[in-house]
Image (cartoon, coloured by chain):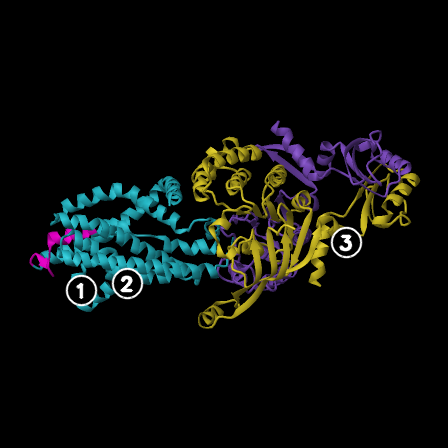
Chain colours: A yellow, B purple, C cyan
Amino acid sequence: MTSPTIHIRDLCKTYIVTEREAGVLAALQSLVRRHMEKVVAVDGLTFDVAPGEIVGFLGPNGAGKTTTLKMLSGLLYPTAGEVTVLGSIPSRREKDFLRQITLIMGQRNQLVWDLPAIDSFELNRAIYRIPTPDYRRTLNELVELLELGSLINKPVRNLSLGERMKCEIAAALLHRPQVLFLDEPTIGLDVTMQRRIRAFITEYNRRYGAAVLLTSHYMADVEALCRRVVVIHHGKLLYDGELSGLVQRFTAHKTIVVQLEDCLADLDLYGEVMTCEDGYVTLRVPKTETARVTERLLADLPVIDLTVEDPPIEEVIEQVFAQEAL
Amino acid sequence: MRCRTWTCTSKQERGGYPRCPVTMSLSGSINLAHHNQLVWDIPAIDSFELNRAIYRIPQTDYRRTLDELTDLLELEPLLNKPVRNLSLGERMKCEVAAALLHRPQVLFLDEPTIGLDVTMQRRIRTFVAEYNRRYGATVLLTSHYMADVEALCRRVVVIHHGKLLFDGELSSLVQRFSAHKTIVVQLGDCLADLSSYGQVVTCEDGYVTLRVPKAETARVTERLLADLPVVDLTVEDPPIEEVIEQVFAQEAA
Amino acid sequence: MRALLDVYVQQFKTTLASQLQYRAALVIWMLGHVLDPLIYLVVWSTVSRSSGGSVGGFTTGEFAAYFVVLMLVNHATFSWLMWEYDYRIRHGTLSFALLRPVHPIHADIADNVSFKLITFVFMLPIAIGLAIVFRATLHLSPWAVAAFAPALLLAFLVRFFLEWTLAMVAFWTTRVSAINQMYFVVALFLSGQVAPLSLFPFPIQVAAAILPFRWTIGFPVELLLGRLTPIEALTGLAVQAAWLALSLALLRLVWRAGVRVYSAVGA
């Protein structure tokens, strides 16, 4: 049994923040006496990631995902608990450790703003001590996979958001890290670019066996990339397992939309009628009944067109989040 | 953030206080170099008070609007924290609130749900829909998140390379660019040959994915259910993202 | 070591190119560094002329020489990072530096030196021009010139490390402007920028010698102008070396403590 690439046990992070009332009087008061409050961002988190695994890290805003990623990459000191990545303790920020990881944050720039991306790449080559032949080879592969072409020779400030993200990703991967922390990598990108980035990550994982821990609010990212998801809420672990298992557990229904001539027919026998508009009837049926009900509908009624869908995964996730909030 | 007031010759009365039409721009793009509405170091509520003064919002209206916004956006625990201590999503919520305190009549929403979790995305959408319903505000929304568009907009305007590509109902855009539907049937295994029913895309663990012309959907589904031991099925339009991708690709070609 | 050299080469390429993009900023900084000592030069020259040609052992020409050399030394040793670090921490841009397997100080050193390499091309002729206009009198001796180089280098390093450490204050408070201002007011007097240190009362001079300020600007200036004996020069170099070790140790300490409390907000 190979040791996990990422190992987290009872990880905790507590912030101390100031809080005060509105207004100038309170501001003056706060000069003398500051009202401190403890915020628990991560509360006893435990999970492992195996080498080469792509894991989706889900949770509502403020759940502690980014805090966890920062602890895993050595930016933050944990308050308590154990964390090792590739056998090193991240907060020690050892050079060998930093050379094997990368943290890509959506819409954030590490490239030098006024210069072509290629100059930033050269800088990274020196910083990460990448031997020149390896650098050339990786650079060519990345340029090809991300379709960078002549983009790398334009000043970064002249690139569009999508082009800039692609260059940022390339810069972050020049040293062929074994562990990728991706914090909302597709944020703000158009659909075409989102899909390309996803395809790229899949390919990178396939080629180099890198472990990937990905957070995203775009469920399309998660569905496309992650078999396994870890869900956290209020800093605690809610679920750790297959995405499909999560969907199974929280959706007992499917939605059938049939297009008829009009809304006159009464379809209560078939399932729970949600709406009817312009002849489009929306029904909710228990998952297990789907095939049977569909068969009956098609046999009994003059159906022009139909759709049979799982609830959108966003709804599922919403339910999951709502669960622990109760 | 851009917010302009036009001086006008006739004052319009809306919601009980005289106002000139005021446009508001709410940008969701997260560039932490500039913060749209909120002062970084002080609690959000202080920035709200500042806006109240800037927009000359009468106290009663301000209180009422603030209460509504606090309720809708669940701002209660956030108002007294310095903005820099808030998470991204919490900050966005406060930005939205700050931008709407003066009840503008025109909303420019530039990626308003960016960086927010699914629950909050839905709440913002619901909120925008409600705001539009209550105050009759005009909303121009850009978003790469198709769920925003599907939930809020009946009409869409598509532009590419600075030119207008499409202006009309979202549903007809979908009609025009998707001629197929996807049927996924769950059988016992992958042995059956289903090419007579439609174009077989994949088969994995007994789940067969078929592509059929839109007009054939009902017929093919009926046949599949009659002929085969179908455990479960799904019949879907192509994801709207694919449709949009095709639209963009059209003009790129 | 070679790897670090490679980093510096690449770092210099980017910082030089970046600095050149902001020519207006370069001009403004230079202007400030010329005007400040120029004002004191004019004041002290006037005082000296109306006091019979000299004050406290400095003739009018020697005052001119003092402030022209001070202008160059101050420019060579100054840093601006303490004004920026607050932004880096509050907006999380420091995170990128922390993710890299090199200490962030190297990028800042390269940035600082790039600035000076570019601006010195203009500062030097300006200094020479001012020296001519104000009839500066320089008594240069070979050994003083030779000792000046290491003195200047040590002054730069000590000042840079101390001010980098000062910048770290941003880890603990957001009100760094006030602290920076305090530092600069004290430095202004105790480093010899307002007037040559020998003109100050003895207690001030002692303070300036105990604190690092004299050793960051005043000492190299006095050395080049030939106002020190060889023994004083050697002692001074030794004190500088001691301050180098001290400032480095302080830097390490504060950096480690700062990183621990870094909360990476905004990133």
Task: Name the chain letter of the residue that bears numbered label 2.
Answer: C
Label 2 environment density (alpha carbons within 10 Å; few <14, some 14–19, many ≥20): few
**Residue identified by numbered label 1:** C200
Tell me whether circle 2 and circle 1 mark residues in contact (CB < 8 Å). no
**Residue identified by numbered label 2:** C186
**Left or right: B247, with C180 as reference point:** right
Q: Which of the two discs, 2 and 1, labels the residue nearer the N terminus?
A: 2
Label 3 environment density (alpha carbons within 10 Å; few <14, some 14–19, many ≥20): few
Determine the image quadrant of residue C192: bottom left
Give the residue type that dot 3 points to. Answer: Arg
**Does the rendering let one see residue B102?**
no
Q: What are the residue bounds of the magenta stretch?
A: C52-69
Q: Position of residue C180 (x, y in %)?
A: 35, 60
**Left or right: C30, with B10 as reference point:** left
**Residue identified by numbered label 3:** A249
Vertical position of residue A27 compared to residue B216: above or below? below
Give the residue type that dot 1 points to. Answer: Phe
